[in-house]
Amino acid sequence: MITETPNVNQLSQVISQAAAPAFLLGALAAFISVLISRLNRIIDRTIVLNGIPPEDTVRSRLKADLPRLMWRATLVNRAILWAVIGSIAVAVLVIVAFASAFFQIQHEVGVAVLFMISLGAFTVSLIDFAREVRIAVSELDHHA
């Protein structure tokens, strides 16, 4: 049960402790936006290549790029998934911090675990992104 509501000093402390996760959440949101833009470009390129008729012998060779584009799309999709998981962990972290202050429960361990989960998911997302970028620049598209 709630014995007393948190005072202004307690809430101020929780808000100051939530600043770092809030910045991480903002960074993850911006990163997800970049990933979605890359995925859209990959999808657009795939649509263009799939639209090349088989009779067009000059451009039909460009369809050889489709497996590489599908692998890139898979990596970006996984990066988005991990970034979203990291974002959810940060959001839950902030909720837990405020709920813990409200119910006057020790929350340090839970918050630390959620922060590590968030950073771990963000790291995996960055790794998938780096792999996708490496594939993208390994064979530069010189096609119109």
Image: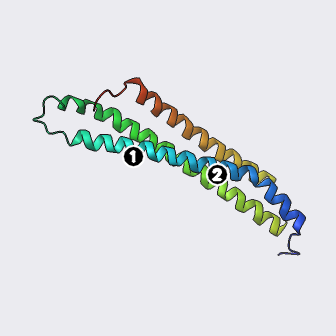
Q: Is residue 1 left or right of residue 73?
A: right
Which element is circle 2 on?
Answer: helix
Counting the numbered discs, the total is: 2
> Label 1 amino acid?
Asn
Residue 44 place in picture, x, y as percent: 32, 44
Measured along the vertical axis of the image, is residue 95 above or below residue 72? below
Which element is circle 1 on?
Answer: helix
Q: Residue at x 70, y 48 (%)?
A: 115
CB atoms at circles 1 and 2 under 8 Å apart?
no
Q: Which mark is residue 25?
A: 2
Between residues 3 and 15, which one lies in front from this camera angle? 15
Q: Is residue 117 left or right of residue 55?
A: right
Q: Quadrant of residue 62?
A: top left
Q: Residues within 10 Å of mark 2 (few under 14, many from 20)?
A: many
Residue 29 place in picture, x, y as percent: 58, 51
Question: Which of disc 2 and disc 1 is earlier in sequence?
Answer: 2
Q: Which quadrant: the N terminus?
A: bottom right
